Amino acid sequence: DYWENTVGVVGSDQDSRAGGANLVPLRNFQIPAPILCAGVPSRQDERIMSHVDLAPTLLSLRGIESVHPMIGSHLTQQGHDLAMVQLF
């Protein structure tokens, strides 16, 4: 079956920018990112997270355990509440 061997992610970019001494408008950076994977129950997560969390999460959902230099966190684990925001 297709979904037994597939992890799907739908994401997008933020809708506003901030620069200089302006505060980052965090409300404008709340972007849904559905992750579809067989055996993972559906839920909505209100924690702060960012794009750097996707790679470690996807590896773990596929059952790949590895030591790597990625700074993100596996999103299905508890205790994560940090986001990396980079503005250009």
Image (spheres, rainbow, N blue to C red):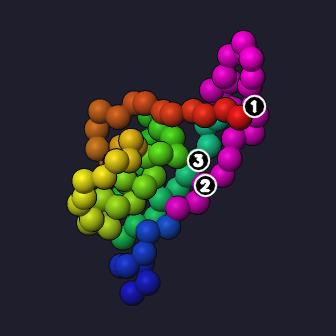
14 in relation to 17, above or below: below
Mark in front: 1 vs 2: 1
Residue 41: mark in rendering: none
State the image coordinates of residue 7 (x, y, percent, origin top left): 44, 69
The one nearer the camera, 31 or 82, is 82
Q: Is 24 included in the stretch rendered in magenta?
A: yes
Q: Residue under label 1, please give it.
A: 17
The earlier-in-sequence mark between 3 and 2 is 2
What is the C-alpha distance between the residues marked 1 and 2?
Answer: 18 Å
Mark in front: 3 vs 2: 2
Say which quadrant the N terminus sits in.
Answer: bottom left
State the image coordinates of residue 85 (x, y, percent, origin top left): 57, 33
The earlier-in-sequence mark between 1 and 2 is 2
* Residue visible at 69% across and 41% down in the picture: 14
Answer with left or right where residue 7 lies relative to residue 87.
Answer: left
Query: Which residues are the magenta region?
Result: 9-28
Answer with left or right where residue 57 lies relative to residue 22.
Answer: left
Q: Is 77 included in the stretch rendered in magenta?
A: no
Residues tagged 3 and 2 counted as in contact (Cβ below 8 A): no
